[in-house]
Every structure is written in structure tokens, then in C-alpha cells.
Image (cartoon, rainbow, N blue to C red):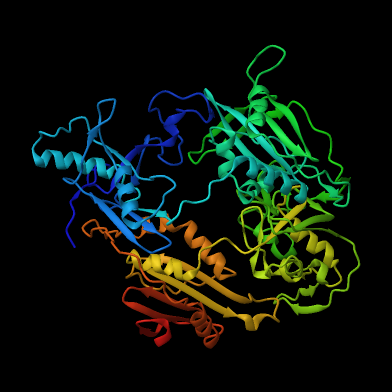
Amino acid sequence: MTAVPVVVCPDCDGMTFTLEPCRCTTYGDRFLADADVLGPRREAYRSCEQCRGAGSIAYPCYRCGRRGQRRAQLVVTVANLDTGAVASHQVVPGGLDPHRDPAGHWVVDLASRVRELAAIVGAVLDEAAAPSLWLDRQWRPDLPAAARHELEAHAILRADHAPWRLVLGRSTAPATVDPAARLARLCALADLLLLDLVVEARRNGAGFGWAVRYEVPGSPVPSGLPSWYRDLPEALATTSAAAALTGLAERGRTAPVRLLRPDSPRPPVAPAVDVDQLERRVLADCVDATNGDELPGAQALWRDGRWWHTTLRAGEPVETFAEQPTGQVLRHLGVPVTRGYAPPDPPWLGAPVARRSCPDCRPPSRLRACDCRLGGRPADSECPHCCGAGLRPSALHCFTCGDNHCLYNTVLVTVTDLRHRVVHLSWQAGTPEVAPLVATQPGGKPVVQLPDRYRLGTWAAVLGGRPEDLADADGGHEIDRDLRDGYVTLPWAGADPVREYVRQAGRGTAAGRLIVVAARPDAPPLPELLRLALGLDLALVVGVYDLRHHASDPLLADGLRWSVEVKPRDAAVRPDDLPYRPSLAAALAWCVECLTDTVAGAAPTAPATPIPVPWSGPRDSVVDPEPELLRLAARHAGQAVTVRFTRAGCAVHRHDDDGVRLLAAGPDLRSV
């Protein structure tokens, strides 16, 4: 492999650390500082807990990883997911082809090179995602080669935060998203899930930032700019149903909790929506009609089969205080944004839900229950954290209520496939249910199982899904086994199992609503990802953990656990690399989501070791290894099995109590 230039890190001058101004110098020698008022330049806080009044701190240089040297090399790789073809281009000093931009600066535009690579592998790209390198003003074509190469190396180092960049494409162009069709689909799903669809424009300098999201009725307007989308069509093209649901709990944590009436009269089928007309109406509402003043923004809410329009206005200023790591207290004067008009309640909202205050947190402070009270124990008078008070400051959410600051007597559960099927459930504390004892915790607490109507796995089957595919609609997190199978641990024998189950399900939800998706994750097949990893000359590491023999024990994880990762081909299998995804599809989806970052992290850490420049033509389809993986997992039930696939073949490892053991190696999985 050809050597690449290694230069002294310009950020730390080879010292492996940098001396930076301390954060306390931002606000000067003041204990109570205003966030919008900067202090005298470089004046340190004399009682600073970080720099002790020196005004500067030594930080390890993160750009060189405390090595003092960096590799002057970038690699851009384009891959075709449909054929496995891979083509790469490396950027090193002396191999640049700069040109002048309209401002007269010398720039290296790699987008054209990416398009050439895409043509070589036959891939269609959404956009040429490649960096542009700006050379220093001192660079000239007539400089001596050594001087030119030094300036080019510095330009490359400015973009080496991702030294290996992967651009994925397919043989055919992806289907374009019709904004009108996407908006109509989101409106129909809002009616199905009994949620509001909010289209919002917020002022951002001279323009507007647009957002499309779901909310529960009564949610306050979020603070800050919702997004950076420049117009409504762009926001719609980027916002899927899953993306619109993300952050639902955070937005609706303080919304009023009310019962649902899914059998109430439903609106007719949503008519076709004119996106351009809706955008113009929202923008028109961003100006006060009475005096022509500019307003912070405007919203359109889809509720009960129609659009409701409202302006956004500045509310009363709110003063907040935040403790800084320096020991200073930062005061911020924020101006919340409120709606100028509140639409009427939809007919599917029912009576308010009874609730009680959470016993383990004290709003609006950061006081949370101390660890000495875990398990229902009384506060320890000798506890070094709370000194017997039972409460201590914490930056984490309250474990009991998830920062709802109250416990609901009813939780509203919605199970959907995010297409056209939905089930609305209402679980109410105090409902008498037959809940047989199925296990006992090591501390003696009883574990009982509630009937089928409380088991989300049963409802997933009703919608045609699999229990292992159940995920929280807000973020896609796996639904734990207790909610999937109806298990609940009682604090004492004779406690109300439904009340404890409702508390567990409603923790940290928006308005007491838990929305669960029962649909298979959107992921490519395993052979496709394996072919790509081989084309990149990396290793595809697949882990599987057969715990199906735990199905009858509610205290243990059960089912099949999977992991799929792309790693350097010589990376070792670590003992703590255990599979934890509930299905192969979930593991594949996560691997693809992190693939570009994973490839960037696969670059060698040693500066003297060059980044590989993979080239590979179209590859034949590989045999699906899933059946053989299942066979290996069943043979070693109760122990995790990790298989590494590389161009040289595959190796099977088993995770034992004393570490990782190599079981077999061969050209393919069938031969081991």
C-alpha cells in the first residue's frame, strides 16, 4: 500500500494538547452572569472550578487523537447497493486539481469526482455529497512543489474529521416524494391516530424555517427554531410519518390528559390538499393583519378533518437559571412563543384523566429520589448523597414518572402499523383482573401476568405484525418484554397489578398516550449488506443470541437477539459485543442508518497507515447466511455466537464466561 504524507498536527503543533480559553472567560469575573451579556475579553472567573482562575485549560487534541501527527489523506467511496460495485478516489497532496471560484479563491470541488465514480459503478445518487477543499490564499500553481504540497496538506486536514466518506446509491433513481401526496397521507394518519398534524413556519433571519410534526391536543409551542427546511415542499419531502412522531413525548409532556373516544363521528376522507396554497396562507399569517408587524411565525393544524390556522405571538418573558461547570450561574431571559388562537377540542377527546403527584420528584427543581430509596426503602440517614433527605439533584429524568411529574390512573395505548390499521386501548388502574403469579424477584417481590388485552404482543398479531417488531413510535425504541407479554412486578403482595402496569406504561408519555408501531423495520436484506461490506474490503460482523428457552421465565430476556456491524477486517471480537436487537431486520436497519459514520470510523487510527482505497466490480449475489446463522445459534443456545465475514472467508466465535473462543474458520459458513 502506497505511503501517504504524515504531517505535524497544526491544531496542537505536535504537542498532543491545546491550551484553550476557559468557559468562564465568556462572561468574566461574575458569579451570576447574563447569557446575552459577554464579559470583558479574556477575563477569568477567579473562583472557577475548572481553571482555578487561570483563564485557560489544557485539552487533549481531539483532531490528532493525542498523537501529534495526522495523515494528509481523504478517501471518497461510492457504492452501488444493488450490484455491490465500489469505486474510490483518494485525495492527497499533489493529486489535487484546484480551480478558482467566482470570489477568486482556489477550491477543489470533489462533487464532480463523485459523479464520475457514480457513473463507474452505475449508481444514481440523490446528491453528490462530497466536501469542497479551500486552499490557503498563499497557494499558487507556480509555487515550488514542496510549498504547494504543504498548503494542500493543510487544506486536506481541515476536512479530515471524516477521513473516509461513503456515498451510497442504487442502480435506479429513488422514487421522488410528491409533497401533496405526503401531506394527504400524514393528514389521514393523524385522523387515524387521533393526533394533530402541525405545519409550522418560524422566522429565521430573513427567511423562514419549516416543520411538520404530530402533537397531542394542548401541547405548547416548542421553543427555538423547529427546523432548517426552507419551504413547505422540502419539509414534506423529508418528513416521514416516523419522523413526524419523533419527539411527541417531549412536546406533549405538559399537555392535558384526557380519554379518547375513537368511536366518535369521524371526519370524511381528507380531500386533496394544495401545498402551495397552504404555504401561502401560513406565510400570510406571519404578519399581523391589524398593524402589519412581523410575527414570530404561524401554524396550520389539521384536526377533525379540516385545517385550523393560527398566528404565533411572543409571550411574557421567562427568566431561567442554569448552573455552569465553572461554578457560575447563567441567567437567560427567554421569550416563549404562544398560539394566538386555540382551535376547538376535537370530538374524539373525552373526560379528563385522574392523576396524582409523583412522590419521587419535585417540579420545577431537579430534585429526584435518591438511590438509597430504591426498592421502596426509607431514606438512609447516613447516605452521602442526600444526607437522609431522600432527594438529590439529578440531570436525569425521574425514573418513576419520566418527568411527567404525575402518575396517571389511565394510560391510552395506540397500536398501529402506520398505514391503515390501528387499535386504541384504555388501561385503567383499579380494574379487577385475574393476574396469576408467574415468578418471584430475587428480593421477594411477586411477578404476575395480566390477561391478553394488556399484552402488546397479542395486539401486534391482531394487526398482522410480529411481537419482536414492536417499537415505540417516538424514537423507534424496542418495547420491553413486560409490556409485550403483560408481566408486572408488584411492590408488595396484594398490590393492584393494573395500577402498577399503568404506571409503567405511562411513564414519560405525551398526555398519557403510548403509541406503538407494529411493523417490520425498513431494512435491506442481509446478503445485500454482506456484498457491500466485501466490496469495501471490510468485515461484516453478525451476532446472534438464542434465548428462546427463556420464553417461560419472565425474569430473563427471551427470543433471538441480533447485531449487525461493519468493522475493519482485522478488528478483534470483544467479549462485550453481545447482540441485543430484537430481530434481524432491526439490526440491519440500525447498521444501515449508521453505515456512513461506521465507515468513517473504520479508517486506521495510526497516521502512518493509509486509508484503503477499495475498488470492486459488480459482485454476484451471495447466499443468504441467515439459515446457517439460526442453525449455529440453536446449536449454542444460551451463548452468543459472532460470525465475521471477510473476503478471506468467515470465522465463527462463541462468547463464553471466560471470553471469546474461535470455534471454526472456513471459506463460507456452510463449511464450518
Left or right of residue 620, residue 218 in this image: right
Instruction: Specify the quadrant that holds the N terminus.
Output: bottom left
Q: Nearer the viewer, residue 509 or 392?
A: 509
Q: Position of residue 127 (x, y in %)?
A: 42, 45
Residue 196, compared with residue 637, is above or below; it is above
Which residue is at 30% across, 49% downward?
116
Q: Residue furthest left?
A: 144
Q: Position of residue 531 (x, y in %)?
A: 40, 68
Instruction: Specify the quadrant that holds the C terminus.
Output: bottom left
Q: Quadrant of residue 429?
A: bottom right
Question: How many numbered marks, from 0 up?
Answer: 0
Q: Nearer the viewer, residue 535 or 579?
A: 535
Q: Is residue 24 visible?
A: yes
Q: Residue furthest right?
A: 432
Left or right of residue 94, residue 335 in this image: right
Q: Position of residue 34 (x, y in %)?
A: 54, 26
Q: Residue furthest top?
A: 291
Q: Nearer the viewer, residue 557 or 611?
A: 611
Q: Nearer the viewer, residue 612 or 625?
A: 625
Which residue is at 29% across, 60% downward?
604
Q: Is residue 672 visible?
A: no
Q: Quadrant of residue 213?
A: top right
Q: Quadrant of residue 472?
A: bottom right
Q: Position of residue 478 (x, y in %)?
A: 63, 63
